[in-house]
Amino acid sequence: MFARYRKLDMFGKRGAMSPNGRFVGGYAASVAPDDSWQYSPVITDLETGEVYEFGPYPEAIHFLTQTMCISDHGVLFIKDGYNGGTVAFDTEGNITEPRSPEGYKGKPTIEATSSDGKYWVGYANDDILSEGGLTRPLLWTDGIPAELPFPDKNFRNEDFRVGIMARGISANGEIIYGTSWENSDFGMLYWKDGKVDWVGKDIRETTTVIRTSPKDGTEYEYTCVNGIICQAWNTQISPSGRWIAGRYRKEFDPETKQRVDEPEYAAFYNTETETTVIVDDYGESGGRFVTDDGIGFIGIGTLAVSEGKVYDLNTGTDLGSTQDWIYDNYGIVIPAGYVNYISADGKYVFGTALHESALGKSFLSWYVAPPLEK
């Protein structure tokens, strides 16, 4: 039977797929009678085709602004842009709001969940940032939050001023990754067996250069880093946590110790061998996802990405575009786009595509799934 390809046009912004691929979720926006916005969370069971839609909720109650993740039990996490934090909706219509650790001043953001929903990862502010607080990476176990450890220094070997955000977790819940957020550093970290380290530590290099302030012309020391970075992406880890995808950013020439134009290339880190594969075959690019057996999915460019490539990290072989790979493996033709996630059994694929309309350009989610159960 042919696989199904569907665009998630119902969502005003991108949706999310559960780790085993059974559920996709997001929200739809509409206009209330008083001309204010209202939002309806939507959860779809890809095995049965059943759709769960709740609300609509006025923006004063739940101002839904970003779909974060969904568990294999159908618990959907969406960010509340007005009230702060994250709101969770399940297929029974129950609504919960995850909590921060005791004494925290900020509501938490849930970024990703393990397959069984036992573990969530994200972040919250322990205090007001302008008064010396930090953004802390958090791990929830059965709904109970706990802090994840910090490295001794930040991405540039300095004291932390802003903090770290936990971004993603392997489907089995064993490995977590996140990003430092110090002056747009985006340094990528991971936690394994209770310890924290930098993703791509085998290729990480630092040097100190002299920079001039554009404000007053004074000179100051600045630490440049050649290393792996990640922004607000939460599906860049393989289901077992064996591989993590990111971008290798080069800030200086190791020989001359001089700054360069900071090119960025797709990079993939193996957490078992602690080695990195940099893929510069496609010019500026970024690793979007990677399977346990080392098939890397790459977005071409670094902003407004609309094209994807597939690469075998084991053999260094180009496997073609996203469309080529989907056709070769699922026997169907899809439009251009790139892959965000694939379930461990390979039956479900979740991706992003550029959509153009009279209203302009936007990015919508799509999925490939097996035929519906009869």
Image: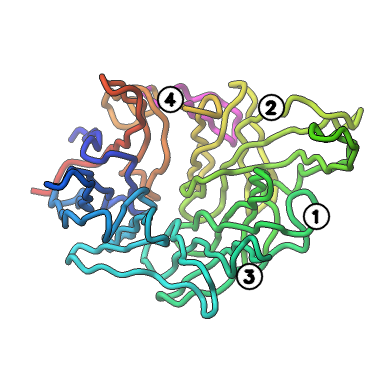
Of the numbered discs 4 and 2, the one sitting upstream in the chain is 2
Q: Nearer the viewer, mark 1 or mark 4?
A: 1
Q: What residue type is disc 1 on?
A: Glu
Q: What residue type is disc 3 on?
A: Gly
Q: What residue type is disc 4 on?
A: Ser
What distance separates the C-alpha of mark 4 from that of mark 2? 19 Å
What distance separates the C-alpha of mark 3 from that of mark 2? 33 Å
Label drawn at residue 297:
none
Q: What residue type is disc 2 on?
A: Pro
**Residue at x-position 48% and y-position 72%:** 100
The answer to whether the residue labelled 3 contacts the one labelled 2, judged by CB atoms less than 8 Å apart, is no
Range drawn in magenta: 307-323
Of the numbered discs 1 and 2, the one sitting upstream in the chain is 1
What distance separates the C-alpha of mark 1 from that of mark 3? 23 Å
Residue, disc 2: 263
Q: Looking at the picture, does residue 258 appear above or below residue 233?
A: above
Q: Looking at the picture, does residue 10 appear above or below residue 358?
A: below
Nearest to the observer: residue 118 or residue 53: 53
